[in-house]
Image (tube, rainbow, N blue to C red):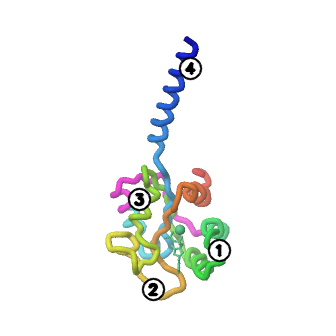
């Protein structure tokens, strides 16, 4: 009897975990970089995110602090575009957002398009709205997290209250 109850409990717990996992949608950190913000494209980017069906969890407008950018772009430190990248990201306000929805990390990167705005396909944010301006850094309108680990780390940098 006791064994039967324990077995039933295990089945129930497994089921609950499956359901719970399914009901916890993924989150991603999106930045509308200073070029996008300056050009008044924040609404257009948010429109595309919402039109796709992802949900906004948080949005803010902020001037990036040097320590935030150092943490956010730690993986690129030492690369030739790192200093211009930090300078560009400090050049004016940006909008930061947390979005939510199953698969939104890969889904937003598909919406964003390729890193290089010249190569980014029409239909994508970068393909439609960004171009090469001849500078040392690619000004490509948006950032999106590239993995669940990056998303958790980046949400902690820009939205400590959600981290
Ligand atoms: P991602 O934003 O598509 O994830 P990353 O490789 O993580 O691309 O690079 C971060 C940012 O650094 C890019 O979005 C772009 O602004 C800039 N960047 C990346 N690679 C280059 C490059 O080769 N030249 C100039 N800027 C670059
Ligand atoms: Mg990246």
Q: Secondary structure at mark 4?
A: helix
**Tag 2 residue:** 133
Label 1 crowd (10 A; few <14 / some 14-19 / many >=20): few
**Tag 4 residue:** 6
Point out residue 72 in the picture as x, y percentages from the top left corner: 61, 66
Looking at the rendering, the stretch of residues picked out in magenta corresponds to 47-64
Q: Secondary structure at mark 2?
A: loop
Q: Which mark is residue 99?
A: none
For the residues marked 1 and 3, what is the alpha-carbon distance in whole angstroms? Answer: 27 Å
Point out residue 134 in the picture as x, y percentages from the top left corner: 47, 88
**Tag 1 residue:** 77
Instruction: Determine whether label 3 and label 4 are within 8 Å by CB.
Output: no
Q: Secondary structure at mark 1?
A: loop
Left/right of residue 42 with respect to residue 88 in the rendered view: left
Residue 26 or residue 17, whichever sits in front: 17
Question: Disc 4 or disc 2, which is closer to the eye?
Answer: 4
For the residues marked 1 and 4, what is the alpha-carbon distance in whole angstroms? Answer: 53 Å
139 magenta-colored: no
Residue 29 visible to an observer of this rendering? yes
Label 2 crowd (10 A; few <14 / some 14-19 / many >=20): few
Q: Residue at x 50, y 74 (%)?
A: 34
**Tag 3 residue:** 107
Q: Which of the two labelled residues, at mark 3 and mark 4, occupies the earlier sequence position?
A: 4
Q: Look at the picture and state if 82 lies above or below 109.
A: below
Instruction: Determine whether label 1 and label 2 are within 8 Å by CB.
Output: no
For the residues marked 1 and 2, what is the alpha-carbon distance in whole angstroms? Answer: 23 Å
């Amino acid at each position: 009897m006791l064994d039967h109850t324990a077995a039933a409990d295990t089945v129930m717990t497994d089921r609950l975990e499956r359901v719970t996992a399914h009901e916890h949608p993924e989150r991603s950190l999106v930045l509308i970089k200073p070029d996008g913000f300056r050009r008044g494209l924040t609404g257009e980017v948010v429109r595309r995110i919402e039109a796709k069906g992802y949900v906004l969890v948080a949005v803010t407008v902020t001037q990036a602090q040097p320590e935030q950018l150092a943490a956010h772009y730690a993986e690129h430190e030492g690369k030739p575009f790192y200093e211009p990248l930090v300078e560009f990201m400090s050049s004016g306000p940006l909008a930061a957002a947390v979005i939510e929805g199953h698969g939104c990390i890969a889904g937003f990167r598909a919406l964003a398009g390729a890193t290089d705005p010249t190569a980014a396909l029409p239909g994508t944010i970068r393909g439609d709205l960004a171009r090469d301006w001849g500078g040392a850094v690619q000004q490509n309108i948006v950032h999106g997290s590239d993995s669940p680990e990056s998303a958790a780390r980046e949400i902690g940098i820009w939205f400590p209250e959600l981290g």
